[in-house]
Amino acid sequence: MLGVLDRILNRLEEVIIVSLIAMATAITFVAVVHRYGASNSANVARWAGVHNLPFLKYTANWVYTGLVAVHLSWANELSTYMFVWMAKFGAALGVRTGIHVGVDVFVKKLSPAARKPVIVFALLCGALFTGVIGTLGGLYVYELDPDQVSPELEWPSWIIYLCIPLGSYLMCFRFLQVMWRFLRTGYVPHQGHGIEYEEPRDTAPLGETVPAGEAAR
């Protein structure tokens, strides 16, 4: 049952990240095309008027009028919020997949037996830090004025800042999850150049044990 819930959480995490970055990219693209289309169509209309090209001038003015009628002043604000939410959940995904930058020169110089407490301590520090940030973020969201809204979208500010406690607590959970799997299997997720991510196993294969020293690789 826990394995099923874990897989559901993994997929939900990935879907949220992919959806946010895809929608933010699309909105940013449309906003840029809209902005440059409006300014360039106005320039073309002026140029056509100077060179006595009435059809081109009419067409450029028609395009300019149509684009100006579409208000996309909110697009930049919405895409910014989407990227912020994506970054918070992406940080949790980074803990699960081991893609965060880490300095392991010191750990590699230790014996396999000495590496285990160092790795556990590092993971606990990560869980403590993200747990504190999540708690402080939750208090900040709780104390926000309910009537405070964003400038363009006029969304309640607590909805926007809710990504801080949610993302931080998810990171805290991922640190504890990685630590638990490391204590059971000796495996810590890690990615490098040209190395594909391998889904962590809760238990080592029958008759096989994963030495703790492999965690730093």
Image: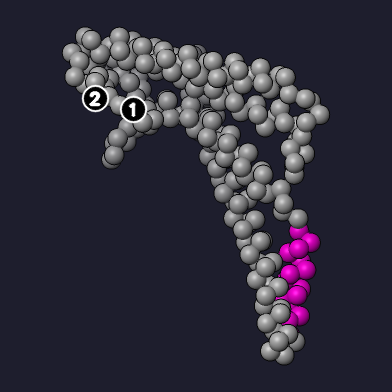
Q: Is residue 181 visible?
A: no
Q: Residues within 10 Å of mark 1 (few under 14, many from 20)?
A: few
The verdict on residue 176 being magenta is: no
Quick check: 49 above or below 126? below
Mark 1 residue type: Gly
Residue identifier under label 1 = 102
Of the pair 4 and 152, the residue shown nearer to us: 152
Residue 8 position, x and y percent, is 52, 24
Q: Is residue 57 magenta?
A: yes
Residue depicted at 28% across the width and 40% down the height: 194
Q: Magenta residues?
A: 55-70
Which residue was labeled with disc 2? 105
- Point out residue 58 in the picture as x, y percentages from the top left corner: 76, 80
Q: Quadrant of residue 161?
A: top right
- Label 2 is placed on what type of residue? Val
Where residue 85 sits: x, y (%)?
Answer: 58, 34
- Please name the predominant secondary structure of the magenta segment in the image: helix
Image side of residue 41 versus residue 190, left or right: right
Q: Which secondary structure lies at badge 2?
A: helix
